[in-house]
Image (cartoon, rainbow, N blue to C red):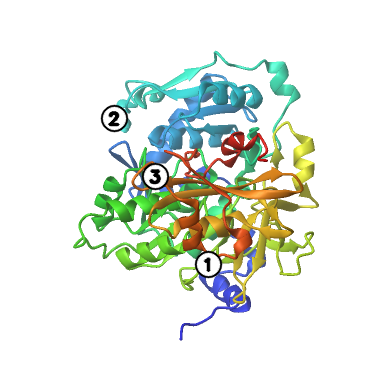
């Protein structure tokens, strides 16, 4: 029989892994990301830090290049507290620019270059940046040598634009909170972008704890295609690598074939991605003879993990697929499964050390489900220029996540849905992730998003799905017959809409607020 871990055992084991008492974690945290780089550069300047754009940089090189770039930024007028938008794909440019701004006490506003013009302009207007940096060319090879003959911005293929520069008065009238390292804009469930202010402590606490719990060390080389415009990629991956002196191999865009090819390489010891990436890894893995003997861990996050997918990944790679949970507003990590305590279910594991939680049962359901609230060094400083929304979600240090959660019999955290997405059908609570998980167990369905639609005195359940092969006609009666073995009758969909693609953020998270446009007209 497998061992069932309990929270008190997890607490003791976590402290053993961290090498310190929970109360003393803050004393172990690097003050800033660039402080971590400088530390490892002094200790071993030749140790590999970053691989991207077909170039590999040591910690010493990253320290030198980020300093040179910070001098260029200073000459362009960057001062402490300024915002500079980084509209960049994963690569050397976004990492070095982030670290250079970090050196100057300025803040990076990291956004995806895949946003629509309307979306980007809305964010830029709200952030009041000094400038916007975009990519116009491929970085030249051997940046250190070219540093002597050309500016680093140019060598990195970057363009500095102050065309959208906000007025000095506007910037002065809307200062950031103290020690903000980055602003990441999130649409949440409303579609209205909010600028999440994450401090150096938020990033480096998450980096230290999540990295330690993965067993990251200086010999590890982590591969990811998670966008650094998302907190998962920036904090839980990049900053965790920097905190532990490991190295990161950063892909500009996800390609299942390219990831599989790199995982065969003995130098890759860890991979982190969202469930949609793992789905492609399993489906595109055409060579069953491939082996990954040096791959030590695989982590999933950013979206609910389906049990069938977890099983398929574990069977193919011979490793537990670990899971985690968090919000941009929580830096992002709140909970994760432990390397030393893999779980067979798809819960999100145990709350990380140093973070407190409480579950507030405002539904009166009596089943242990309520809104999850958390507090700790990972919690954001607030929403930029939005005191009303900040006050609505932050109270006495507690962050109201808006997620419905419960603790299972093993003490692990289970996320059952969003409060705003809770469907009440015939007086019963229906949690969309449970229905989505059941739908994804059907081989014909590769993505699913379930929402409630208002009808007179009730709600009906609408499922949006993506099929394989694309556009497959699905009979609602047949689908519900398949689902009855795992879902109560009141949880079965009332309607299924097959779409070519479900709208998704660069992180892979399905954007339900866009699907809501299809439900504007109440069904009769």
Q: Residue sitting at 69 percent across and 48 percent down?
A: 420
Q: Residue sitting at 56 percent across and 51 percent down?
A: 204
Q: Badge 2: how crowded within 10 Å, few (<14), some, or many (20+)?
A: few
How many discs appear?
3
Residue 455 versus residue 397 in the image, above or below: above
The one of 61 and 491 positioned closer to us in this rendering: 491
Disc 2 versus disc 3: distance between alpha carbons?
28 Å
The answer to whether residue 119 is visible is yes
Disc 1 versus disc 3: distance between alpha carbons?
34 Å
Residue 396 on image: x %, y %: 81, 52
Label 1–label 2 contact, CB within 8 A: no
The one of 297 and 41 positioned closer to us in this rendering: 297
Query: Does residue 145 appear to the left or right of 17 in the view shown?
Result: left
Name the residue carrying label 2.
Answer: 145
The answer to whether residue 27 is visible is no
Instruction: Name the N-terminal-most of marks 2 and 3.
Output: 2
Name the residue carrying label 1.
Answer: 486
Q: Badge 3: how crowded within 10 Å, few (<14), some, or many (20+)?
A: many
Query: Does residue 195 appear to the left or right of 101 in the view shown?
Result: right
Secondary structure at badge 1 equals: loop
Q: Residue sitting at 47 percent across and 46 percent down?
A: 465
As drawn, the label of residue 284 is none
Name the residue carrying label 3.
Answer: 225
Disc 1 versus disc 2: distance between alpha carbons?
62 Å
Q: Nearer the viewer, mark 1 or mark 2?
A: 1
Residue 35 on image: x %, y %: 52, 46
Residue 68 versus residue 501 in the image, above or below: above
Secondary structure at badge 2 equals: helix
Residue 426 on image: x %, y %: 72, 57
Q: Nearer the viewer, mark 2 or mark 3?
A: 3
- Hey, which quadrant is residue 408 in on the image? bottom right
The one of 128 and 115 positioned closer to us in this rendering: 115
């Amino acid at each position: 029989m497998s061992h069932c871990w309990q929270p008190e055992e997890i607490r003791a084991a976590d402290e053993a892994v961290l090498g310190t008492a929970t109360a003393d974690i803050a004393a172990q945290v690097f003050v800033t990301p660039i402080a971590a780089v400088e530390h490892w550069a002094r200790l071993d300047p030749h140790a590999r830090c970053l691989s991207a754009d077909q170039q590999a940089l040591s910690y010493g090189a990253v320290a030198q290049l980020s300093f040179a770039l910070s001098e260029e930024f200073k000459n362009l007028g960057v001062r402490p507290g300024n915002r500079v938008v980084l509209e960049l794909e994963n690569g050397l440019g976004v990492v070095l620019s982030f670290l250079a701004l970090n050196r100057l006490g300025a803040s990076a506003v990291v956004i995806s270059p895949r946003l629509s013009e309307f979306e980007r302009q809305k964010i830029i207007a709200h952030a009041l940046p000094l400038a916007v940096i975009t990519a116009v060319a491929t970085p030249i090879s051997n940046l250190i040598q070219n540093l002597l003959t050309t500016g680093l911005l140019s060598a990195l293929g970057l363009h500095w634009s102050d065309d959208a520069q906000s007025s000095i008065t506007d910037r002065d009238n809307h200062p950031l909170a103290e020690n903000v390292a980055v602003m990441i804009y999130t649409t949440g469930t409303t579609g209205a972008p909010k600028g999440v202010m994450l401090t150096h402590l938020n990033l480096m606490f998450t980096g230290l704890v999540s990295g330690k719990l993965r067993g990251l060390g200086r010999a590890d080389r982590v591969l990811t295609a998670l966008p650094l415009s998302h907190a998962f990629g920036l904090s839980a991956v990049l900053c965790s690598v920097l905190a532990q002196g490991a190295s990161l191999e950063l892909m500009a865009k996800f390609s299942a074939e390219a990831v599989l090819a790199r995982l065969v390489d003995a130098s890759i010891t860890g991979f982190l991605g969202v469930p949609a990436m793992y789905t492609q890894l399993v489906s595109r893995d055409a060579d069953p003879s491939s082996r990954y003997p040096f791959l030590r861990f695989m982590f999933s996050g950013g979206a609910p993990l389906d049990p069938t997918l977890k099983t398929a990944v574990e069977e193919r790679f011979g490793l537990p697929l670990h899971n985690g949970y968090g919000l941009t507003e929580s830096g992002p990590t709140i909970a994760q499964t432990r390397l030393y305590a893999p779980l067979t279910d798809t819960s999100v594991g145990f709350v990380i050390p140093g973070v407190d939680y409480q579950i507030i049962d405002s539904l009166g359901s009596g089943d242990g489900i309520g809104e999850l609230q958390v507090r700790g060094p990972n919690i954001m400083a607030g929403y930029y220029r939005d005191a009303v929304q900040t006050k609505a979600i932050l109270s006495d240090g507690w962050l109201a996540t808006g997620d419905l959660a419960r603790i299972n019999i093993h003490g692990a955290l289970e996320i059952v849905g969003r409060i705003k997405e809770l469907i009440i059908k015939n007086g019963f609570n229906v949690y969309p992730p449970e229905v989505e998980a059941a739908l994804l167990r059907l081989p014909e369905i590769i993505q699913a998003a379930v929402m409630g639609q208002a009808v007179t005195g009730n709600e009906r359940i609408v499922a949006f799905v993506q099929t394989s092969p694309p556009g497959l006609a699905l009979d609602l009666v047949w689908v519900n017959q398949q689902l009855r073995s795992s879902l109560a009758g009141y949880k079965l969909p009332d309607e299924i809409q097959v779409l070519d693609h479900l709208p998704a953020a660069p992180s892979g998270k399905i954007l339900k607020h866009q699907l809501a446009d299809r439900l504007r007209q109440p069904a009769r």
